[in-house]
């Protein structure tokens, strides 16, 4: 594809964080363009970004003539078009186990603590800080408890692995690390999830994950 691969994102966006990790694992170069989700009411609501993605959400990946939003769709696109280092296991049923766990994180846990939901709780529902934090903690704990059980069951039936499902990072790990980052940012007690913690620790030893850390992005300082 085009050498002018562009990722529109925001340093603290979990979904953009996933795509950065995926691009790094595949060693694909890209230009990062910041869409500041807070400044001036949120640059994602501006006309120029609306033309790029009417959903007003990051990330958006532009790869030549291809333009995609939704992080899981982007990761699947990258796997299909740049298959040298796969993120999604090829063989069934492991392939579908990986996709299901990734969706558990990206579709069930994350949406309930993302920026626009929290802003709605504050602005439209007059939700106080204590109640908002209780909301965040409740949904993250519910999601992580189920995920910890699924990961444990996988090990009990398939044997120990370094990462979530295999001995190399998969789409599950790509989604898990940003969600744990969010949990830590919101001071969620992670002690009930030793398996999740060990997987994230292993991931964060790898340059592909380290280079994607939110605080390392240029717009984190903006």
Image (cartoon, rainbow, N blue to C red):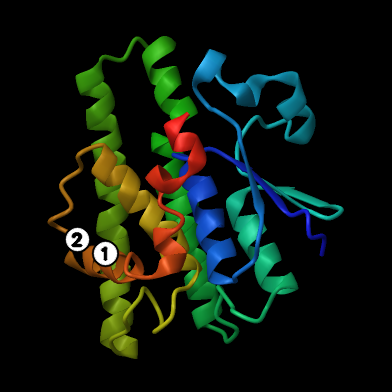
In the displayed structure, 31 sits above or below 47; it is below
> As drawn, is 144 to the left or to the right of 94?
left
List x then y, in percent, for residue 190.
18, 52
Labels 2 and 1 touching (C-beta < 8 A): yes
Q: Residue at x 28, y 55 (%)?
A: 144
Q: Is residue 101 visible?
A: no
For label 1, count other residues whose C-alpha is less than 10 Å away and answer few (under 14), some (14-19) or many (20+).
many
List x then y, in percent, for residue 134.
22, 30
Q: Is residue 198 visible?
A: yes
List x then y, in percent, for residue 9.
58, 41
List x then y, in percent, for residue 177.
37, 58
Image quadrant where residue 207 sits: bottom left
| CA gap, disc 2 and disc 1 | 5 Å
In the displayed image of the protein, which residue is found farthest to the right?
65
Image quadrant where residue 113 sits: top left
> As drawn, is 148 to the left or to the right of 8?
left
In the displayed structure, 81 sits above or below 147; it is below
Image quadrant where residue 5 sits: bottom right
Badge number at residue 193: 2
Badge number at residue 196: 1
> As drawn, is 181 to the left or to the right of 96?
left
Badge number at residue 8: none
Q: Residue at x 56, y 20 (%)?
A: 42
């Amino acid at each position: 594809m085009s050498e002018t691969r562009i990722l529109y994102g925001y340093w603290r966006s979990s979904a953009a964080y996933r795509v950065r990790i995926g691009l790094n694992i595949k060693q694909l170069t890209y230009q990062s363009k910041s869409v500041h989700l807070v400044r001036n009411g949120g640059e994602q609501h501006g006309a120029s970004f609306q033309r790029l993605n009417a959903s007003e959400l990051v990330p958006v990946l532009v790869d030549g003539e291809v333009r995609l939003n939704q992080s899981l769709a982007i990761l699947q696109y990258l796997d299909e078009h740049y298959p040298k280092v796969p993120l999604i296991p090829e063989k069934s049923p492991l392939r579908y186990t990986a996709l299901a766990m990734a969706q558990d994180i990206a579709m069930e846990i994350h949406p309930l603590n993302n920026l626009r939901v929290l802003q709605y709780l504050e602005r439209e529902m007059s939700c106080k800080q204590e109640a908002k934090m209780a909301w965040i903690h409740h949904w993250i704990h519910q999601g992580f408890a189920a995920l910890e059980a699924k990961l444990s069951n996988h090990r009990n039936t398939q044997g120990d692995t370094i990462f979530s499902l295999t001995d190399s990072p998969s789409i599950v790990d790509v989604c898990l690390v940003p969600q744990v980052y969010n949990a830590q940012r919101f001071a969620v007690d992670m002690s009930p999830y030793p398996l999740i913690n060990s997987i994230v620790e292993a991931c964060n030893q790898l340059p592909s994950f380290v280079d994607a850390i939110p605080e390392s992005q240029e717009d984190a300082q903006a």
